[in-house]
Image (cartoon, grey):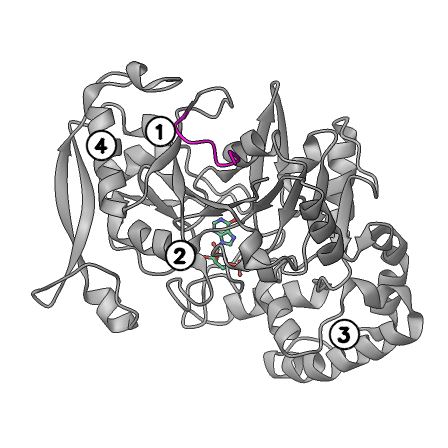
Amino acid sequence: MANVVVVGAQWGDEGKGKIVDWLSERADVVARFQGGHNAGHTLVIDGTIYKLNALPSGVVRGGKLSVIGNGVVLDPWHLVKEIETIRGQGVEVTPETLMVAENTPLILPFHGELDRAREGQNAMAKIGTTGRGIGPCYEDKVGRRVIRVADLADDATLELRVDRALVHHNALRAGLGLPEIDRDALLASLREIAPEILKYAAPVWKVLNEKRRAGNRILFEGAQGALLDIDFGTYPFVTSSNTIAGQAATGTGIGPGSIDFVLGIVKAYTTRVGEGPFPTELDDADGERLGTRGREFGTVTGRKRRCGWFDAVLVRQTCATSGMNGIALTKLDVLDGFETLKVCVGYDLDGERLDHLPTAADQQARCTPVYEELPGWQESTEGARSWADLPANAIKYVRRVEELIDCPVALLSTSPERDDTILVTDPFAD
Ligand code: IMP
């Protein structure tokens, strides 16, 4: 049986929610492997809108197992609230349908405070984070002072872990002018939330390996996008986890050989929220038009997304670092009506032509995009369900994108409706 990893191939917000939902219907297990409630996945099922942050998308579909892997950072209070909200929408969530890895790090209130304090400190430090404590929690994980789900089960261990974290955080907070953490209040709120989380706790690595052996189909659901990867993204303007496909293995505890297909989600143009380099960014009427037509506002923070032309160089790069077997191209309809479309095919760096984005920040800043122009189309592509429904120039655009990024289109999404999808290759096919 095939196991599929889905990752965003740009800076997040590529429209993963719909594709993941489409695939999750065919999966037995849906697993999150990185990120936290900085993600915002919107699912529209039979006219009902579900907004998920921490929960895997499979949770809204009955009969699936949803898994939060150890690569995720989890805010326990947010999780409980999110579960309550979707329960209110009629979705059943039980320890049989949701499992949280015992070794998942917990985001605590002081992580969010630290995140926001740093962002507000000065322009130099600003990353444009979601302010949800993601970075500080991952820092504590690698600093070996984080509190993990399993620590909630034993009071003595919990106290020890809290004290270890506070030694570090109180020193840091003093430097930032923040008050000391109230140890007793923190412990009390952790003890209160513990049973709500522990009922979902499980050795996820073991469960997933058993499921895989039993022939279950596992869908690994990425959050954010490959250009926000801590190693391969536009550092330091990135998130604090590995967002590329390899993380599906370490973030859940399955071997890399268990991954059969990597699907990259690619928007037909480019967007980004937060700070950082964006070579094809448009600061003109075309950019405004992409933003308005594409309804480009962040689902988590409500921020207006920066918009620009499709950057084939960057997507070719992320197809390589994630080993994409195919892409799902989304939001093609947003390009309807443009006279001419531009696609970035290389960069000019001080007169030299580059076929990749250099790593050094000063060089990135001096890179100017080299564009290829393609004819636009005036017809609507919204809701197209077969190639025959697409204008010839739209097909030309898609074919050129495939060529430039060196990866085939497996799926083409033409509206937020799940059935408005053209299937070329089924990622779950054996
Ligand atoms: P953090 O993940 O909150 O630390 O934010 C770091 C960077 O990642 C910022 O530029 C955020 O805007 C961006 N980011 C985090 N989560 C998402 C997401 O789900 N979609 C798009 N951008 C995101």
Crowdedness near tag 4: few (<14), some (14–19) or many (≥20) residues, C-alpha within 10 Å: many
The answer to whether residue 234 is magenta is: no
Amino acid at pointer 4:
Tyr
Q: Position of residue 207 (x, y in %)?
A: 75, 51
The residue carrying mark 1 is: 293
Q: Quadrant of residue 193?
A: bottom right
Residue 121 can be seen, yes or no = yes
Q: Earlier in the sequence, mark 3 or mark 4?
A: 3
In the image, is the residue at mark 1 within 8 Å of ligand 1 by its beta carbon? no
Q: Earlier in the sequence, mark 1 or mark 2?
A: 2
The residue carrying mark 3 is: 181
Q: Earlier in the sequence, mark 2 or mark 3?
A: 3
Q: Is mark 1 in CB contact (under 8 Å) with mark 2?
A: no
Amino acid at pointer 3:
Ile
Residue depicted at 45% across the width and 66% down the height: 126
Residue depicted at 52% across the width and 32% down the height: 18
Q: Quadrant of residue 255?
A: bottom right
Badge 3 marks a residue whose secondary structure is loop
Amino acid at pointer 2:
Leu
Q: CA distance from mark 3 to mark 4?
A: 55 Å
The answer to whether residue 428 is magenta is: yes
Quadrant for the N terminus in the image: top right
